[in-house]
Image: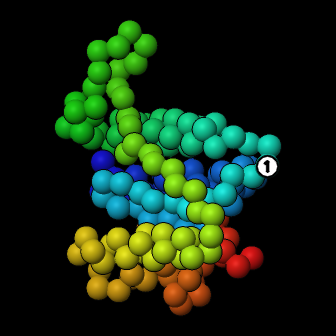
Amino acid sequence: MLEEDAVKDIITSSLSFLVKAKRVDIYSFVIMSNHLHIIWRIKNGHKQSDVQRDFLRFTGQKIKFYLLDNNKNELLEKLEVNHHNRQYRIRLPKSLSVELWTKEVFLQKLKYIHDNPVKAGLCKLPEEYKYSSTSFYEIGIKNWNFLTHYND
């Protein structure tokens, strides 16, 4: 489901909203065809579980509307459920939270995230992949307004 750029754009819009709403700082991300990675810091006054739940729910709704509006019937059929209160279940990949307590661990995860598209064969250099924070760190291009450099 995450293969289409339009769906990736929905995710980046959701990330941008979270930053504008002052719920998180986002330091790094990559959106792959079947999963995504985000390094974020939840701002004071917000709970990680609430932010994560709202991000997944809002993004899932936006993806559902995109699929409906663009007649993605084959994919919609795969997402159909027989629940009394919903017709489709849009699920982003299950999340795993890892605490990044040291700069060393942070940098290790940052490298892992940025190397994902290369390992998947989507590009030769990490900064060539559009849906990633790599170009921000490697060549200083801030394609995503929601990013904060980890040194800031």
In the rendered view, tell whether residue 113 sits above or below residue 32: below
Q: Residue at x 54, y 71 (%)?
A: 105
> How many tags in the picture?
1
Q: Quadrant of residue 85?
A: top left
Instruction: Indicate the position of residue 140 as horizontal and vertical percent values.
Output: 59, 87
Instruction: Indicate the position of residue 18 as horizontal and vertical percent values.
Output: 66, 51
Asked whether 112 or 62 is in front, the reply is 112
Classify residue 70 as left or right of residue 48: left
Q: Residue at x 35, y 26 (%)?
A: 88
Residue 107 visible? The answer is yes
Identify residue type, mark 1: Asn
Question: Residue furthest toward the top?
Answer: 84
Q: Which residue is mark 1?
A: 44
Classify residue 106 as left or right of residue 44: left
Classify residue 125 as left or right of residue 101: left
Instruction: Indicate the position of residue 49 as horizontal and vertical percent values.
Output: 60, 38
Asked whether 49 or 126 is in front, the reply is 49
Instruction: Indicate the position of residue 145 as horizontal and vertical percent values.
Output: 64, 68
Asked whether 57 or 152 is in front, the reply is 152
In the rendered view, tell whether residue 114 sits above or below residue 50: below
Classify residue 108 as left or right of residue 52: left
Q: Residue at x 66, y 76 (%)?
A: 149
Q: Quadrant for the C terminus, please.
A: bottom right
Question: Residue furthest toward the bottom?
Answer: 139
Residue 26 visible? The answer is no
In the rendered view, tell whether residue 40 sits above or below residue 96: below
What colour scheme does the image use? rainbow
Q: Quadrant of residue 118?
A: bottom left
